[in-house]
Image: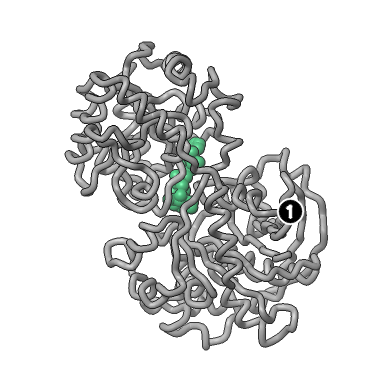
Amino acid sequence: MKKILFATSEAVPFIKTGGLADVAGTLPKYFDKKKYDVRVMLPKYMCMKQEWKDKLKYKTHFYLELAWRSQYAGVLEMELDGVTFYFIDNEYYFGGGAPYGNIHEDIEKFAFFSRAVLSALPLIDFRPDIIHCHDWQTGLIPIYLDNFRYGGEFYRGIKTIMTIHNLKFQGVWDKKTVQDITGLPDYYFAPDKMEAYKDANYLKGGIVYADKVTTVSNTYAEEIKTTFYGEHLDGLMNARSNCLSGIVNGIDYEEYNPQTDKMIAKTYSADTFRKFKKKNKTALQEELGLEVDERKMLIGIVSRLTDQKGFDLIAYVMDEMCQDDIQLVVLGTGEERYENMFRHFAWKYQGKVSANIYYSEEMSHKIYAACDAFLMPSLFEPCGLSQLMSLRYGTVPIVRETGGLKDTVEAYNEFEKTGTGFSFSNYNAHEMLGIVRYAERIYYDKKRDWNKIAERGMKKDFSWKNSAKQYEALYEEM
Ligand code: ADP
Ligand code: GLC
């Protein structure tokens, strides 16, 4: 039996700000339980829902010597769907209103977390064969492990994987402060280790010290070796390309299932969506004050509102797009300029554009179920889960051909009658608009073809099954 520990800063259903939580919370369920004991460790945030906090059981606690400070670290635990989750407790670090805040605070917070993960292991009597680290917040783990190995038998031989969900966020701060916070020796603060461009860089350290590096799609694994997508670490990605691979994400097919979804107005399947899916559209139109018309093409967006997601393109042609016979519903939070942009257009095009500037799981399900198309013109996209959710709900994705979007959405070919969505290649607003308008034409003039596109998408399998197999193969290789 191989023991694996996921170290992550978020995991559903406990705490989520983006796709990382979906991955870290659901992927562990899909490993072969006879061969793998996969457990997850994350911070116990005070902002977690009370219903979860109430369920956690105290396991142990200890004091951590972090540089010159001695800090309390509690360990709580709970089992969910056969997976054990451990929570590291410290109210000073994890007491904020959200998992992440100021970077200088987060730098210390996740140094503490990474150290605590390693120190907790002997106390909970779990010695993983592999620690699977996710994103910069856990980038120090492979470094601490390297540092610990000299000290203790317990840690010798533990392997690490660093999975990059988003190369843009690296956890960068000045070397002196980081050295003070982490208590790591000088040795690690060199350009061939965790130093990058004179600063300390957590993710870089993780990438350098991990035994294997993965990212969440094949295309992104290639893209990050180029200067455009490499976020200044493309040199390193090339240097580590022997250990770097892409494994595309899946989604939880039980949680996202139009046949059983309790949050949507009318359930449906690949056989019945032609008849029933539109009931979700009219219900949503009514709920959000859009003109109620089941024939109108409804385009959805569910997203963090950041420039990664291509909102500059949308902003640029929004007025033009709104001249068309479509409706647009947005659900998201993030940068103020994008929040305000959508508020503005919802005011300007009442009954046609609906801006929902908040976070709601339930509303996201309603949108995936109600819309005809889903727009995701990302500037870059390591994998993307929203387009997979859309495919599952028979909502046709319109995407830019980058990262995971390229690997999961197959462009419609009018002549061969293939494809599951629409895509464009250059980061150009009018190229996007051209494709949106092409999709409109198919939707309005070739409804049977449109429905076939949706049906093909629904029949694709983007459950975790395949990806879990690939992670298992990687674990075996190590
Ligand atoms: P990223 O991780 O870059 O944000 P992904 O597409 O991988 O992008 O994952 C985004 C996840 O967050 C999806 O599950 C999506 O439904 C969800 N999501 C994003 N914004 C919201 C919101 N405002 N309300 C509910 N869910 C949201
Ligand atoms: C990141 C990426 C997104 C990916 C998610 C889960 O947040 O932006 O593309 O799907 O992580 O891996």
Question: 386 and 429: which one is in front?
Answer: 386
Q: At numbered mark 1, what does the secondary structure look like: helix, strand or loop?
A: strand
- Residue 266 relative to residue 32: left or right: left
* Residue 167 screen position, x and y as percent: 41, 61
Q: What quarter of the picture does the C terminus occupy?
A: bottom right
Q: Is residue 332 visible?
A: yes
Figure quadrant of residue 31: bottom right
Q: What quarter of the picture does the N terminus occupy?
A: bottom right
Residue at (48%, 26%) from the top-left corner? 270
208 versus 213 height, above or below: below
Question: 234 and 391: which one is in front?
Answer: 391
Figure quadrant of residue 174: bottom left
* Residue 425 screen position, x and y as percent: 23, 47
Question: 20 and 418: which one is in front?
Answer: 418
Tally the numbered discs. 1
Q: Which residue is mark 1?
A: 84
431 versus 261 height, above or below: below
Question: 128 and 18: which one is in front?
Answer: 128
- Residue 435 relative to residue 332: left or right: left
* Residue 213 screen position, x and y as percent: 49, 68
Packing grade of label 1 (10 A; few <14, some 14-19, many >=20) is some
